[in-house]
Image (tube, helix red, strand yellow):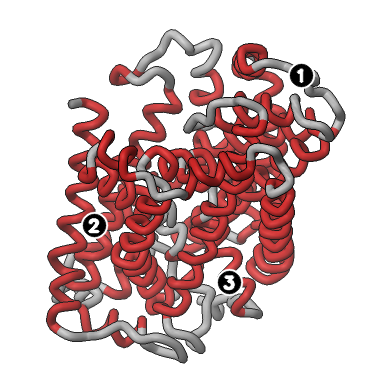
Amino acid sequence: MSERSQFSSRLGFLLIAAGCAIGLGNVWRFPYITGQYGGAIFVLLYLLFLLGVGVPLLTVELAIGRSSKRSIAKAFNILETPGTRWHLNKFWLIPGSYILMSFYGLITGWLLYYCYKFVTGGVEQGLTQDVAAANFSELLQNPLTMFVCMSTVTVVCFVIVAMGVERGLEKITKPLMLLLLALLVFMSIRSVMLPGFLEGISYYLKPDWSALEKHGFLEALWAAMGQAFFTLSVGQGSIEIFGTYVNRKHTLVSEAIWIGLLDTFVALLAGFVIFPACFSYGVQPDAGPSLLFVTMNTVFANMVGGDFWGALFFMFMLIAAMSTLIAVYESIIAICMEVFGISRVKSVVYNFVFIMLISLPALFGFNYLSFVHPLGFDTIMDLQDFLISNNILPLGSLFMVLFITAKTGMQWKNYIAEVNLGQGPKMLSSTPVYWYFHLVLPLIIAALLLVGYIKIFG
């Protein structure tokens, strides 16, 4: 096999790996649950779990990738003890990326639609939340518009991936991520001048013990743990593939910390944009898709210069979503190249067609197939989200943690050697740390998996 491609700079790797982690959950979930569960108290809990759960899981995926220099299609075959069957887990890990891409491109298409509307001045000034909700519902009832938007972002992202690691992923995605960070900082500074800035930030970050008591400390604890886990996109191999492209100049602990910090930076600053705007214009913040496509749409439509600020906001969101698409597409393309021995371009073409086809059920689930409620979920996309968020991601992370500590897997000594290779902070190889990875982390992941099922089906 030819020599593995590598990023030409550490910054390129960090920005692109962070781009995989930075996604819609940073904006439509993190700010809302922070305000809901006690502001700064929740942030502190989240940071503790980020360091204790998120960063260790990042090092696990990166170590598997950097040590094997293969995607999840071949990595376990190389690292496991010969004759064992750890590699069979790839047959449910690989579909996870396809399930995620079967609806994530559709949501990214919605962002493109609203960005275009604000850029062209197509958003009605002074509209109410009810009108904004009706407009979003109208979009969901228009499969042709959604298909055009979805296919547009999919084509753009696949073209970038087709250009390769250095000429495509690094050369194009790195400036996009820098633009994303610049837009976020610019909009956060702008928020300081809004009349509801102090009220919004107070709701967002002021320690609020009453909010914590209202929901219960245990519930806030689970929310912080879940956010720290899911925000980094670990568990399906999207991070693992970037470990195959990184050099050994820096320890993976160092790289994981930087990725976690960049992801948290975006999540925190998103709240500085959202809450002051909502409180300035008397709009109640919400979580989920309605935050972006109803709440924020209403805010910008009632703001002086709203077309400009709305365009910037949805451009920021579009870049964040596309960075995740590009990262997962790269994982999928690398898998197909290794398994089928085909060129990057052929892999891109085949996967483009396939992903567009498997995206149709989610798209039609809001119109032609709106009568379908699989397993009691409201839409087909809700089921797809449940499969990836509440099943494949936690189970994938559980499997990988067990794999690096098992005697028949990668083995603890080999994991430690790979993680600590290079300059930067090292992972302790002591017995307590081993048992934390071998027992405590699996129990935490299993608890998250169980709580997720209880919340949905309990």
449 relative to 426, above or below: above
Which residue is the extreme one toward the top?
A: 371
Q: Position of residue 76 (x, y in %)?
A: 30, 67
Residue 347 shows in this picture: no
Quote the CA–CA distance across marks 3 and 1: 43 Å
Q: Which residue is mark 1?
A: 126
What residue lies at 27% left-to-right and 63% top-to-bottom? 400
Residue 159 shows in this picture: yes
450 relative to 415, above or below: above
Quote the CA–CA distance across marks 3 and 2: 25 Å
Q: Tag 3, which secondary structure? A: helix
User: Is 48 on the left-hand or right-hand side of 437?
Assistant: right
- The three-letter amino acid code for the residue at tag 2 is Leu
Q: Nearer the viewer, residue 328 or 118?
A: 118
What residue lies at 37% left-to-right and 44% top-to-bottom? 208
Dot 1, crowdedness within 10 Å: few (<14), some or many (≥20)? some
Q: Which residue is mark 2?
A: 398
Q: Position of residue 254 (x, y in %)?
A: 45, 79
Q: Which tag, 3 or 2, sits closer to the chain's start?
A: 3
- The three-letter amino acid code for the residue at tag 3 is Phe
Q: Tag 1, which secondary structure? A: loop
Q: Tag 2, which secondary structure? A: helix
User: Is 8 on the left-hand or right-hand side of 125?
Assistant: left
**Quadrant occupied by the C terminus:** top left
Callout in the foreground (1, 2): 1
Q: Which residue is mark 3?
A: 13
233 relative to 58, above or below: above
Q: Nearer the viewer, residue 455 or 97?
A: 455
Q: Which tag, 3 or 1, sits closer to the chain's start?
A: 3
Q: Position of residue 39 (x, y in %)?
A: 42, 47
- The three-letter amino acid code for the residue at tag 1 is Gly
Quote the CA–CA distance across marks 1 and 2: 49 Å
